[in-house]
Every structure is written in structure tokens, then in C-alpha cells.
Image (tube, rainbow, N blue to C red):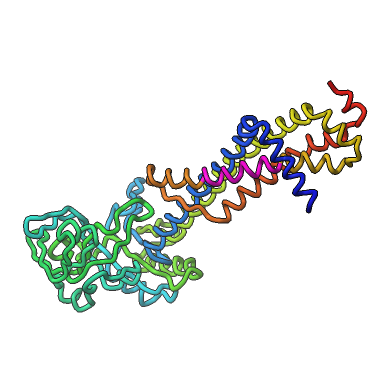
Amino acid sequence: MNKLLASVRIALRALKVNRTRSALTMLGIIIGVAAVIAMVGIGAGATARIQQQIQSIGSNLIIVLPGSISTNGVRMGSGGVVTLTEDDAKAIAAECPSIAAVAPAVRGGVQVVYGSSNWATTAQGVTPDYMTIRDLTMMSGQFFTDQDVDAAAKSAVLGQTVATNLFGASDPTGQVIIIKNVPFTVVGVLTPKGQSPSGQDQDDVILLPISTAKQKVIGANKANAKAVGSLMVQAIGPQAMTQALEEMTALLRERHRILPGLDDDFTVRNLTEVFAAQETSAQVMSILLGAIASVSLIVGGIGIMNIMLVSVTERTREIGLRLSVGAKTRDILSQFLVEAVTLSLLGGLVGIVVGLTASMLISYFAGWSTQVSLLSVLMAFLFSALVGVFFGYYPARKAALLDPIDALRYE
């Protein structure tokens, strides 16, 4: 222990003698550690943001859209034709044991008016099950009920964006708004959900009973009054997603009388799977950024090795003198090795400070979400120490193997 402390003191003294050179040598390690911390922080922040957005959508979700059929060789996209109905939703809920709830929905753009304020937004006609499926909670008031749907009540639930733009900081519960010249009573305001993974504002919406939305706001399909724009489906658990997809697809094909071999007249999307793929992409990007930043550490290690080789050459006579008065090979080896590791550790400490500062500045000026974990800081610091050991070993060994006589004769 005493020898190690003595080696550290000698190393610090040697670094102090050549301050400028030592600082420049550490620069590579500083940049490398700072880059690793900042890049991993950006990647972790992106992953956390995606996870938050996925949770805001709901869990175990499947969305069914109408359309996607072929007509005279032309394949139509999702929503191209109206093929789903409220009866489909009831049948899925009743006959598919792997599905917990189903919520049919229709939607359309509307202009909402309150007093002298107005706001363009999206009105969605849904059923009370929509609240459970989307994991919605109320900030004030309450969600409408099945009785409101049956009675086509003029009740409206506002998203936070709509409430803020129409009522400011006031609670709109109980107030009357106008949508397409129809008065609606605001029965509640949703707790903010933020942006969806696709970047849409989930709070810029008005929820209405589906019956009311069809009759008074969006309009019902003339050919089929029970037609809906989509079905939001929730499986009973993550392990039941595959079974739920199979049960639902088979039931809809049977109800729509689609013969074997023909295309479905609906499109099923597993939202959990889609969003999980985005999360995986963000995690891979985080690892990739960390790996790229690690290259800077290796470059910094090469700089340490070069400087240590120069130091060995400059101090050849000193090494010869120490060997001639009894110093052993391992003493010389440890001296130069400790010197290299001290360089990299000091660089690592400064790099941590720079990395944390850079993460905060990126988050502040660029608006990117960053998350710097203790693990990433420790990993970057330990990696910088390993770089010092790896790249400092060759110069230290070269110094330790010098012949004392030749070293003393070195000019």
C-alpha cells in the first residue's frame, strides 16, 4: 500500500512538471468520457420518453380499422371502405374470451365555441369502455355512462388542450359549449396524456357519446347507421395478444362472410408490438451512440501511450539510476503504470463533469430529454481506467526491461 501511494505521488509529481503536456494528453480521455455520458444519456432519455408515450396509449391494445380490400385489382388502404359496425364490437366482446373490452369509435374535425373563444379540434364518439381501454383518468368531473350513450346525451368530456384554449385556468365542468350549433354540457376534463408515439397531442380532443356524435356532430353513414371508424380492443393480458388477434380475426371473417383465400376487409394492428419495436430501436440507438463515443476513449488511450513512451525515453537515465541502486523491475513497471492510470483517471473525473454539464446543456437548449444514470457514469469512469492500464502497460514494460548500464549511458 505504501509503495502504491509512493508511486501515485511520483506520478503526480511527474505530471505536475509537464502540466501542459499532461492536460493535452488527458484531453482525449476527457472528450471520450464526456461523449459516452452525454450520448448514453440522450439514448436513455429517448427510450424513457417512448416508454412514457407507450404507457399513455394504454396496455395490450389492438386497433381494428375498416377497409384494405381489393376491388378490380386495386387494393384499398385502411379506412378506404366502411366495413366495421357497433355490432362487430359487441360480438367481439361477447365471443372472444381473450379480449377484455372493445370500444367502437367515430371521429371527425369540429370547431368548438365557448363564449367569444373557439378552437378547432377532433371530436371522437366513443363508449364508456374507451376510458378503461385507454387508461384515461379524470382531472375533474366524470366520464359519460352507458345511459348517456343510449339516450344520445349532449355530454362532452374535454382533453386538457381543448379545456385550456377555451376556458384558460377555469374548470369547465358544467359549462356549455357549442359544436356545430349544438349545445353540449361539459361533464368532465381528462388528465393530460401528452404526445402519442406518433407525435400527436392526445389532449387535443373532445369525447362524446358515440350515438350523439353520429346523430348531431359527425354524421352517420347513410348506408349503415351502425358503421364505425375503428375498434379499440384490449386483450386480457400481454400473453393473450396472439390468441386475441386470432380469435378476433376469425370472428370478423365469419361475420363479414369472407371466404377462405380472400383478403380481409379490415386491418388489425397490434399497437403494443409496434410501440415495443420503437422502444427497441431507441435502445439500439443508445447502445450505438455509446459505442461510437467509446472510440474517443480508445483514441485518448493511444495518446496516453504515446506520451508515456516519450516520458520513458526522457527519463531513461533516471530509470537506470533507480535500477542500479536496487529498484526492481516491478517497481519501475508499477511506477509508469500508475502514472498512466493516474492520467486516465484524472481525465475521467474531468470528463464526468463535462459530460454531465453537456447533458444538461443539450436538454436545456435542444429540448431533448436526457437521462444520465449512475451506472453509465461508473462504466465510463471504469472504462477510462482500463484504457489507462491497457495503453500504459507497453511503455511501463519497456521502461522496466531497460538494462541499467545502457540506461545510465543513454544521452
Rendering quarter of residue 56 = bottom left
Q: Is residue 292 visible?
A: no
Name which residue lies at 44% across and 73% down: 236
Q: Which secondary structure is most common in the magenta stretch?
A: helix
Q: Quadrant of the C terminus?
A: top right
Residue 331 visible in rendering:
yes
Q: Position of residue 350 (x, y in %)?
A: 57, 43
As drawn, the residue found furthest toward the top would be 411
Q: Give left or right: position of 294 versus 370.
A: right
Q: Is residue 37 above or below residue 106?
A: above
Q: Which residue is rendered at x = 11% and y = 63% of the image?
A: 177
Query: Camera-side residue: 244 or 320?
Result: 320
- Identify which residue, 334 or 149, lies in the foreground: 334
Q: How many numbered discs sit on the rendered protein?
A: 0
Q: Is residue 80 above or below residue 139?
A: above
> Which residue is located at x 21 percent, y 73 percent?
141
Q: Residue at x 82, y 29 (%)?
A: 316
Q: Position of residue 245 (x, y in %)?
A: 44, 65
User: Left or right: where does residue 339 sit relative to residue 106?
Assistant: right
Q: Nearer the viewer, residue 277 or 83?
A: 277
Q: Position of residue 74 (x, y in %)?
A: 34, 46
Quarter holding residue 389: top right
Relative to residue 329, is residue 101 depicted above or below? below
Residue 21 falls inside the magenta stretch: no
Boundaries of the magenta span: 341-355
Please give left or right for residue 238 compared with residue 109 in the image: right
Reply above or below: 177 against 97: above
In percent of width and height, residue 164 lies at: 20, 58
